[in-house]
Image (spheres, rainbow, N blue to C red):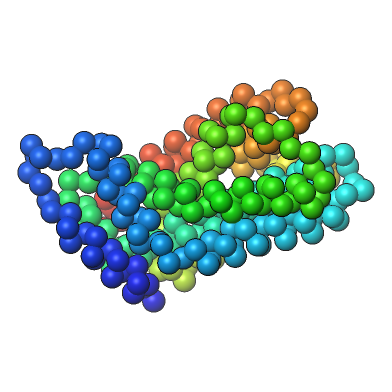
Amino acid sequence: MPNTTETADTAGVLSVMRPPDARSRPGIRTELGQLISLQILNWRWTWRTFLVLGTILPVLYGLMLGTALRHSTPGAVSHALIGAVLLSASVDSMGKTSAHFVNLRQTGGLDHLLRLPVRPALLIVSTGAAFCAFALPGIVATIVLDAWLLDVELAVSPLAVLVVPVAVFAYVGIGALIGGLTPTPELASPLSLLVSLASLGAGAVVLPAPLLPPALQAVGDFNPATYIADALRGVLLPGDHPHLAISVLITCVFTATAVVSAGAWVRRWAA
């Protein structure tokens, strides 16, 4: 069923966004700011689910997996920590985004927005920015708590300010595509979960490569989450990370591709 609270909030905010003529069209920064405010207002009541899915679940996941791997291959506990961070970003942000776009389509909010002079790409970016703001506290809490509980040393690089939000944006872009291409929330939610679990299981994401079957190691080379995880390890953990630059580059390219693709498709999603 469509979320009536979000529907009411959307209608209230959209009602004041009148279609201006071409000369009065707002600039990109103004439009982006308005859309981010709209998304944050729509989701201001969901902090409880962000707390559970974005913090408590990943912390417990990282703690249990890290404890089980403590006497395993060197670096396995650190992989568990980064796996928990990606779980927070993927399950929470991607699932919320897919549900959000399905709801927008079903309630007519997307039709209303697209009748306004709204740039489709900014609609995706604003959703990513809003959900990133919601997700980052849980991600930071997951990093700090699991590092403390698992006794993992952190070495946070200034690049983390770039890499962590970009990682969240990657899953927001995928979630937008799922929400735009699936007909109902009942299908979008399990599909988002399936994509999340598949991305975590294929390649050296939550487990070091030596602990994986050869088939999963090979598949991991084509899994964007492998490079996202490697980029996160490079900016959050100590040690040499020879592939950090290429992992960050692949992460940024994948994120841009997901967001641009969702922006290109968004007008086709309107009923």
Q: Quadrant of the C terminus?
A: bottom left
Residue 227 place in picture, x, y as percent: 63, 36
Inspect this view and state whether residue 238 appears: yes
Residue 178 place in picture, x, y as percent: 45, 56
Inspect this view and state whether residue 264 appears: no
The relative height of residue 16 versus residue 155 in the rendered view (above or below) is below
Query: Camera-side residue: 269 or 128?
Result: 128
Relative horizontal placement of residue 164, taking residue 121 as reference (left or right): right
* Residue at point 81%, 50% (across, down): 150
Residue 162 place in picture, x, y as percent: 53, 33
Query: Camera-side residue: 257 or 93?
Result: 93
Q: Residue furthest right?
A: 71
* Residue at point 28%, 70% (across, down): 8
Q: How many marks?
A: 0
In which quarter of the view is residue 10 placed? bottom left
Residue 196 place in picture, x, y as percent: 59, 54
Relative horizontal placement of residue 8, taking residue 58 as reference (left or right): left
Q: Residue furthest bottom?
A: 1
Q: Quadrant of the N terminus?
A: bottom left
Relative horizontal placement of residue 90, taking residue 132 as reference (left or right): right
Relative horizontal placement of residue 171, taking residue 17 as reference (left or right): right
